[in-house]
Image (cartoon, grey):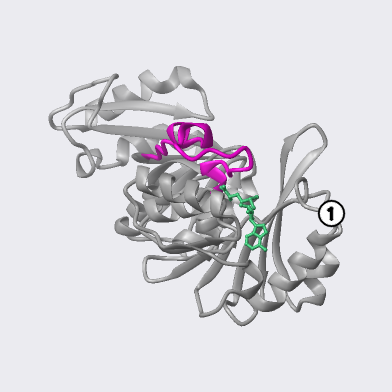
Amino acid sequence: MKWIIEASKEDIEFARTEAEALLKCGVKVLQDNYLFPQTLPERRMEEFCRRAAYSRKVSRILFVCYEKETEKHIKGYDWDRVYGKSFAVRIFRGDKAKEKDFADLIWDRLRKPRVDLTSPTTQFEFYSLRKYVIACLHFRDIRNDFASRRPHKRPGFSPISMQPKLARALVNISGADKKARILDPFCGTGGILIEAGLMGIRAEGSDIDEDMLSKARQNLKHYHLSIPTKKQDACTIKGRCFAIVTDPPYGKNTRKGDIPALYSKFLINARKVTNTIVICMPSFLSIMPVIRKSGWKVKQRFRFFVQNNFYRYVLVLKK
Ligand SMILES: C[S@@+](CC[C@H](N)C(=O)[O-])C[C@H]1O[C@@H](n2cnc3c(N)ncnc32)[C@H](O)[C@@H]1O
């Protein structure tokens, strides 16, 4: 089946990368925030909709035609094949005034037509992209209840906690699936662990600060997640995992000179633990030389605006 994904607009390349990592296939940007993955079965899309943080909606493509031939194609399509009990027509990126005309044409083609504009069982969608029209069947709205999981709504709060949307995307772009195990060795209050746990990914966390760990445990309990956490220096972690997904300290509360040394020690040791690190860091730290010296390659880099002149990088590092 062919699909169209409506990505959220903050960072299309980040959304595309997340989609590729989750779907494990190539994903192109069709236009603006519309993504086009390779042909995929429905169950893969179900899983995508359950996990994606930077996408909003998925629709199944029924046919593609030249814009000027849309009506001819609507008349020629067997709509009963995909029709439920009622329908609505929505036009995205096109002439909304034509919704009624298209609905009339589809009505004529259905055996038992019924229009329901508030909660149709079948929503037919039309997207005008360049000179083409893509006719689709609405599949899923992706609803992530990020607002209810914001750091200040959790029992163990810290101002340095990561927002759930970004935390979820970091786990996703690591490529971890349910068989994989990820590690957050600077877990703080557990923002990354919570999102991994809610997606059913095996995760473990550690932190050097007992107070942070106690907050992380309160938060994990709050979401009924049993994720192991322990006190440990991130520079001495052992064992093997699929990926490290983490958000190390920024240096605001640490002596600044210590931060590059901490990153260096952590990155050198982490080579024994994994082949992939997804790491978040503020743009004011010049960590790139440290990364290169520690033997990691920057596979991807994304920059997010936080506030004022403050940006944050998300880096995907590979050995
Ligand atoms: C930016 S915070 C992580 C925030 C976390 N993502 C959250 O959602 O709460 C960085 C964390 O690294 C921890 N940390 C600092 N130095 C460490 C070290 N050497 N080993 C392990 N953890 C360390 C701090 O205690 C802090 O909790």
**Residue 185 to residue 33: above or below:** below
Location of the C terminus by quadrant is bottom right
- Residue at image position (26%, 24%) is 119
**Residue 279 to residue 294: above or below:** above
196 or 32, which is in the foreground? 196
| Amino acid at dot 1 | Lys
Q: Position of residue 237 (x, y in %)?
A: 58, 74
Residue 145 figure quarter: top left
The range drawn in magenta is 141-167
- Residue for badge 1: 256
- Residue at image position (30%, 58%) is 43
How many marks are shown on the rendered structure? 1
Q: Position of residue 292 (x, y in %)?
A: 80, 73
55 or 213, which is in the foreground? 213
Q: Is mark 1 on a helix, strand or loop?
A: loop
Q: Residue furthest bottom?
A: 272
Check residue 159 for magenta coloring.
yes
Q: Where is residue 266 in the image (x, y as percent from the top left)?
A: 69, 70
